[in-house]
Image: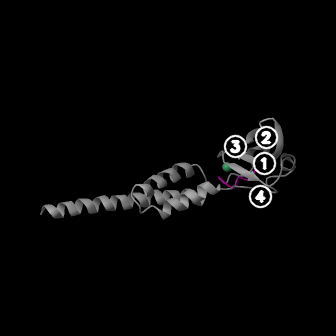
Amino acid sequence: MNTVIGQENAAGTIRIHCPACGARDVPATIIEHREHVTEFAVVTVATHTTWWVQCSNCKATLYSKLNGAQLETKTADELVGLVYYRVSFVHQFLAIAAVALSFTPGLGTLLAAVAWVVNRKTKGWPRKLSKLAFIMSFVFLGGLILMAILSEMGRRH
Ligand SMILES: [Zn+2]
């Protein structure tokens, strides 16, 4: 049986030009994210480490191409392009699915609401797309209700 244990450690502070909020020379925390894959929860068979940088201004977690030691030797200018905002696949998928299904009352409305909540704190296009899906789903839902009311009124006269 394999178990994956995630572990996060703060590993120092650097300065970055934040790609998420646009702040320049802003302090950011280096985060080491270590995933241990253990066999029977005893023997570590694999360790996968990724490095992240959290902006102190907007709290966005940015993906780093460099490890902690390399990060500390770089200036904010040098880190442009090496520390960047990465939108998770789930967020992208949710945003696209929400728009695609926004015309279905019920399912589309629910999906748009979920996508909007999940993407609310992220930056970039999935957030805008989720918001669009949310608005679209309500326009469609409103249209449907209006049509139902109109046809109901039409039947009475
Ligand atoms: Zn920021």
Q: Is 19 colored magenta in this rendering?
A: yes
Q: Amino acid at mark 2?
A: Thr
Asked if disc 2 is less than 8 Å from ligand 1, the answer is no
Which segment did they paint magenta? 15-21
- Describe the colour scheme in one phrase: one colour
For the N terminus, the image quarter is top right
The alpha-carbon separation of the residues under discs 3 and 2 comes to 33 Å
In the picture of the structure, the residue carrying the numbered disc 1 is 51
Asked if disc 3 is less than 8 Å from ligand 1, the answer is yes
The alpha-carbon separation of the residues under discs 1 and 4 comes to 15 Å
- Residue 52 spot, x, y in % from top left: 75, 48
Disc nearer the start of the sequence (3/2): 2
Quarter holding residue 126? bottom right
Question: What mark, if any, has residue 38 been given in the picture?
Answer: 2
The alpha-carbon separation of the residues under discs 4 and 2 comes to 35 Å
Q: Amino acid at mark 3?
A: Ser
In the picture of the structure, the residue carrying the numbered disc 4 is 80
Q: Are marks 4 and 2 in contact (CB under 8 Å)?
A: no
Image vertical order of residue 113 relative to residue 12, above or below: below
Q: Is 49 colored magenta in this rendering?
A: no
Q: Kindly report which numbered mark, 1 or 3, lies closer to the viewer in this rendering.
A: 1
Q: Amino acid at mark 1?
A: Trp
Q: Residue at x 81, y 35 (%)?
A: 42
